[in-house]
Image (cartoon, rainbow, N blue to C red):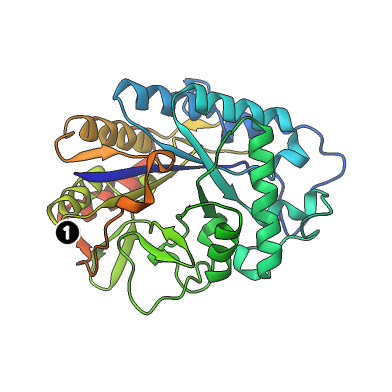
């Protein structure tokens, strides 16, 4: 049985040109448009954000991990964070911690650095410990009783991040993305990580990926893969006896055209992909189970190394390019 981790980065991005390099105006007090788009996916045709995702997950009997970014709440309003946490947890899904340090220049808390840097790995170990502790406090204040896992914004972690995760009592991290190694992700290892591996006392769950054409990798993100590419990767991972397969999407991934002064529009392609993925997983429960970190006993994680890199089929990749070209016009 392959454990499929459907992970949803749940975050808010302000409508402000040049942010975060250019700070938000002190006159900006309303973030209603951003909240509506980033969390609820409001469009003229209905909501395609968290409510839609959770409803579909429950319809198909699936579980997901919502990696919620809480720093925004110090600037935008804690009531929004409470509402998001409540929606997810009452929907039967789990909340874990996500941090985007871009918000640091917008908020004040004497326990954490006062100025933003793009990635967690740009902060010293003690600063990273404090940042994660701040995130835990914020989510707990919003109603999360127990946290187990962390993901750095933009996958921007290093080994110090994992040490900071461990020092805050979390058991799991999911920041390692092979497609972002280098400038963004700096978890430096001597070999390619395909399955969970214990590093700095934390179990690292890498983002899954596949080779879509020679010498090029594609990570398993809903918006980045065709439905058939994702299906093929899942089936191949199951055939190889993998323990876990980690998929990424975002709270706002089913809408497009997020901008000030207008409603977003449904992203028909990504909505179709999400529906296909949920249906596929629900129809193959003999092979796949959607898993969550709060129910995972770290003592049962097997050491499965090394593994073969997954490969997609060329015609599925070609179809993805065609789909994405068409989606720009419809």
Instruction: Write the residue at 25% across / 47% down.
Output: 230
Residues 205 and 212: in front is 205
Residue 84 point in image, percent of width and height: 59, 29
Q: Residue at x 16, y 40 (%)?
A: 287
The x and y percentages for residue 184 are: 53, 67
Q: Residue furthest right?
A: 26
- Corner quadrant of residue 314: bottom left
Residue 131 in the figure: left or right of residue 248: right
Q: Is residue 268 above or below residue 136?
A: above
Q: Is residue 279 above or below residue 299?
A: above
Foreground residue among 1 and 151:
1
Q: Nearer the viewer, residue 273 or 115?
A: 115
Q: How many dots with numbers?
A: 1
Residue in the picture at 33% in, 40% down: 291
Dot 1 corresponds to which residue?
A: 314
Is disc 1 surrounded by few (<14), some (14 to 19) or many (20+) residues within 10 Å? few
**83 to the left or right of 291:** right
- Which quadrant of the rendered structure holds the C terminus? top left
Q: Where the N terminus falls, by quadrant?
A: top left
Quarter holding residue 119: bottom right
Judged from the image, the secondary structure of the residue bearing numbered disc 1 is: helix
Residue 327 makes an appearance in the image: yes
The residue drawn where x is 52% and y is 53% is 151
Q: Position of residue 263 (x, y in %)?
A: 58, 28
Front in this rendered view, residue 234 or 19: 234
Residue 180 percent coordinates (x, y): 45, 66
Report whether residue 263 is seen.
no
Specify whether 20 is left or right of 298: right
Q: Give the residue furthest to the front.
A: 299
* Residue at the far bottom in the pictured view: 190
């Amino acid at each position: 049985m392959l454990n499929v981790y459907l992970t949803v980065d749940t975050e808010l991005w302000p409508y402000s040109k040049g942010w975060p390099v250019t700070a938000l105006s002190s006159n900006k007090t309303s973030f209603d448009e951003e909240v509506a788009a980033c969390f609820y996916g409001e469009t003229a045709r209905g909501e395609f954000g968290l409510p839609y995702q959770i409803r579909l997950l429950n319809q198909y009997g699936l579980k997901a991990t919502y990696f919620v970014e809480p720093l925004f709440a110090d600037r935008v309003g804690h009531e929004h964070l409470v509402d998001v946490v409540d929606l997810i947890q009452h929907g039967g899904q789990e909340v874990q911690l996500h941090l985007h340090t871009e918000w640091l220049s917008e908020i004040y808390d004497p326990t954490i650095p006062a100025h933003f840097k793009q990635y967690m790995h740009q902060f010293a170990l003690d600063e990273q410990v404090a940042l994660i502790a701040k995130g835990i406090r914020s989510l707990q204040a919003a109603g999360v009783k127990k946290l187990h896992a962390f993901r750095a914004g933009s996958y921007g972690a290093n080994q110090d991040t994992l040490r900071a995760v461990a020092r805050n009592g979390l058991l799991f991290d999911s920041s390692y993305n092979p497609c972002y190694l280098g400038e963004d992700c700096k978890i430096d290892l001597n070999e390619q990580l395909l399955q969970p591996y214990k590093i700095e006392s934390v179990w690292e769950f890498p983002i899954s990926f596949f080779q879509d054409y020679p010498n090029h990798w594609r990570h398993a993100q809903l918006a980045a893969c065709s439905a058939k590419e994702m299906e093929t990767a899942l089936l191949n991972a199951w055939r190889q006896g993998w323990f876990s397969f980690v998929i990424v999407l975002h709270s706002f991934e089913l809408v497009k055209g997020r901008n000030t002064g207008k409603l977003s529009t449904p992203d028909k392609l990504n909505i179709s992909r999400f529906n296909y993925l949920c249906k596929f997983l629900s129809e193959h429960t003999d092979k796949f189970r959607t898993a969550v970190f709060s129910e995972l006993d770290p003592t049962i994680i097997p050491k499965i190394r090394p593994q073969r890199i997954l490969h997609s089929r060329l015609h599925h990749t070609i179809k993805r390019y065609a789909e994405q070209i068409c989606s720009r016009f419809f």
